[in-house]
Every structure is written in structure tokens, then in C-alpha cells.
Image (cartoon, helix red, strand yellow):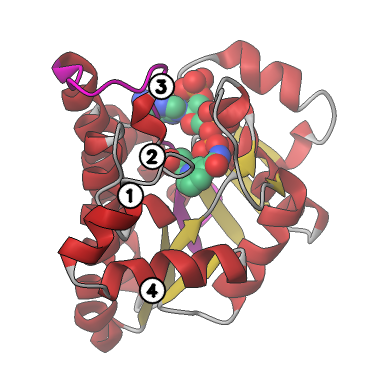
Amino acid sequence: MKAVFITGGTTGIGMELAKLYLLRGWKVGLCGRDPIKFQESFLTDREHVSFYPVDVSDRTALKAAIADFSRVIGLDLLIANAGIGYKFKTKVPDFDWSYKMVHVNLLGVMYAFEAALDVMIPSGKGQLVAISSIAGYNGLPGVSAYSATKAAVLKYCESLHLDLRKFNIAVTTICPGFVETPLTATNTHSMPFLVPAPRAALLIARAIEKKKMVYAFPFFFASIVRFLSILPRTWYRAFMGLRAVNYSKE
Ligand SMILES: NC(=O)c1ccc[n+]([C@@H]2O[C@H](COP(=O)([O-])OP(=O)(O)OC[C@H]3O[C@@H](n4cnc5c(N)ncnc54)[C@H](OP(=O)(O)O)[C@@H]3O)[C@@H](O)[C@H]2O)c1
């Protein structure tokens, strides 16, 4: 039986991925800070799920959780999914929240990968996945630290994809557009091409199976964002000046 550990697997994308892998017969390990969320999301199915009440910004605790799961169950796949967004979008950054975002969205991915590689490199196989965002392709207005952490994760994984091939370890970065989860539930701006979370999990699992280097979705929205990322920055600035696309004006 295969085994996957998912950080932030108690709600949203992580929870849907966990349920999908359970349906496929995998053993699943999850972490999240709030055990109540786990209990509410996994009323049944608990037999094959191990929950660790761990904050991903706690390197020692996350390492211990992943080591324990690997020792007892195994580890074929690690999905670094836990992430936080903004409660408010402002022109002047909330620096306390920005630093928190670096700890969770960026260091949380590194800590999870570090713990997984302790197991995967000696065993000569495995797959690492990080949930970045299409917000990582361009510096988006109003979400500076979010864009920065997601861009960092994207490039970090791009390097690791090349480095870890020699250890037979695949690295995949997932860049979702807007997905319907508790994270986006409080957004007051429009969310074009919003994808339901179960559909997002299906698309993500398919990309993981194909061991893609990077997978951005939904296709049309991701194509626009990728196109914007290759534009001269003066053109990008002009585009983001349009009222319809600049959320930071709120
Ligand atoms: N939803 C979207 O539109 C969208 C788009 C692009 C990328 N993403 C990315 O996808 C990932 C999942 O997002 P989501 O929309 O599914 O969010 P979500 O529903 O808010 O779920 C986030 C999960 O992460 C956990 N978590 C948050 N901070 C944590 C921490 N410090 N330590 C451990 N667990 C933590 C949460 O549980 P606790 O609160 O109990 O810890 C929860 O299980 C994030 O990385 C997000 O940036 C989302």
C-alpha cells in the first residue's frame, strides 16, 4: 500500500487530495494546527489516516511528524500544501503577516522537503510536491508577500527537480488559479475561472502521477498569467493599472 504525507490536509485542497488518495487505497498522513478541523473533515475514513497536530513553521516538530509517519507507514509521496493568504489586501504591507507568510508558505515547504528527503534519498525513490500558485508568476498588487513566497517555492522546486533526478526523486510544482476553499471564501473581489476543490484535487493528482515539473491550472487562466509573466514589465504595469484586474484598489 502506498503512503502520502500532506501538510495542511484538514481543509480545502489538502483535504480533497487526502480523500482522493484514501479512495485510491493509499495510507495518508496529515498535519494541521487545529485538530478540530481534522475531526470535522474526517468523520469517517480515519482508519487509514494519521493526523499530526503540527505547525509547518516548526521545523523540529514537522520533521518528527514526517519521520514518525515514514517509520510506521512509509513515504512514497510528500505534498507540501499548507499555506496562508491575506485576510485584507492593502497597499501598505502588513509586515508581521508577511513574515508569517514566509515562515509558513516558504520555510514550511523547505522543512517538509528536508524531512521527506531524510527518508527518500536513502531509499532511492519518492516524489516531492509543493502547492505554489499562479500568483507566483507575477508580482501581484495587494499580495506582495504571497506572490513572493509562491514565486520562491516555484523556483526552489524548479532547481530541486533538476538536482534530485539523480536520486530517482521527482519534484512537481502545482500552481492553482482560484480554488473554492476556506482560503478564498473571504475574498470580496471577483475570482475568474474559480475551480471547485474536488476538481482541483483530481487535476493535481493527475499531474503528480505524470510527474510533471510544473502544472498550472485552469488552462486558460494559467495561460493568461504565464503570458503576462513574459511581457516587458512596462506593459505588465499598464495592464495591472486596469481597474478590473487590480485588486489592491479595494
Ligand atoms: N484556494 C486557492 O484559490 C489557492 C490558489 C493557489 C494556491 N493555493 C495554495 O494551496 C494551498 C492550500 O490552500 P487552500 O485554499 O486549500 O487553503 P485552506 O482551505 O485554508 O487550507 C489550508 C490548510 O493548511 C493548514 N495550515 C495553515 N497554516 C498552517 C501551518 N502553519 N501549519 C500547518 N498547517 C497549516 C490548515 O489547517 P490549520 O489552519 O488547522 O493549520 C488547512 O489544513 C496553500 O498553499 C495555498 O496558498 C490556494
**Mark 3–mark 2 distance (CA, rounded to whole Å):** 8 Å
Q: Earlier in the sequence, mark 2 or mark 1?
A: 1
User: Mark 4 — residue?
Assistant: 227
- Indicate which disc, 4 or 3, sits on the residue closer to the N terminus: 4
Which of the two labelled residues, at mark 1 and mark 4, occupies the earlier sequence position?
A: 4
Report whether residue 94 is seen: yes
**The N terminus: image quadrant:** bottom right
- The residue carrying pointer 1 sits among few (fewer than 14), some (14 to 19) or many (20 or more) residues within 10 Å by Cα, namely some
Residue 148 x, y percent position in the rendering: 21, 45
Distance in Å between CA atoms under marks 2 and 1: 6 Å
Span of residues in magenta:
73-95
Amino acid residing under circle 4: Phe
Q: Residue 250, which numbered label?
A: 3
Please give the label number shown on residue 240: 1
Task: Please say whether residue 75 is one of the residues in the magenta stretch.
Answer: yes
Marks 4/3 in contact by CB < 8 Å: the verdict is no
Horizontally, residue 208 falls left or right of residue 242, namely right
Helix, strand or loop at mark 3: loop
| Pointer 4 residue Cβ closer than 8 Å to ligand 1 | no
